[in-house]
Image (cartoon, rainbow, N blue to C red):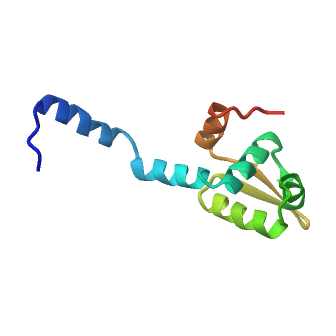
Amino acid sequence: MVQPGDLSQVKRASSALKDVDTAGWTLRFDLLSDPNRLEILLCLHRAPGICVGDLAAALGRSENAVSQALRVLRQQGWVSSTRVGRTVSYRLEDQTVHDLLHWIGARHG
């Protein structure tokens, strides 16, 4: 193990690890690193309450592929679904993800 040159700097640096949920942020960035999921989140941000078929059409993807990605996002609590009859609509629920989308340049309609 390396001997520290400045123990106060070592303590200050290591205290930063206690301030942030690194496992939680790693999961967030992992989910956001997939272009398909990120594009779905951007669409949900702009068009809350969109159904899978319309979302798939907007993205140029199959409903099955979009549904699978939505399932992952729903499991993490980022997205919620509402069923009305046979139609299921989706919306972005996670405020931190919402804020991150704004930070990268996403705007509302």
Question: Which corner quadrant holds the C terminus?
Answer: top right
Is 61 left, or right, of 80 in this rendering? right
For image coordinates 35% across by 38% down, the residue present is 19
For image coordinates 8% across by 42% down, the residue present is 3
Label tally: 0
Q: In which quarter of the image is residue 51?
A: bottom right
For image coordinates 18% across by 35% down, the residue present is 11
Residue furthest to the front: 2
Q: Quadrant of residue 15?
A: top left
Please state the horizontal and vertical placement of residue 49, each as a whole percent of the image. 83, 49
Residue furthest to the bottom: 64
Please state the horizontal and vertical placement of residue 54, each as a whole percent of the image. 90, 56
Of the pair 106 and 82, the residue shown nearer to us = 106
Please state the horizontal and vertical placement of residue 39, each as a whole percent of the image. 73, 49
For image coordinates 64% across by 34% down, the residue present is 104
Residue 2 in the image: above or below residue 16: below
Is 86 left, or right, of 48 in this rendering? right
Residue 34 in the image: above or below residue 97: below
Please state the horizontal and vertical placement of residue 17, each as a whole percent of the image. 31, 42
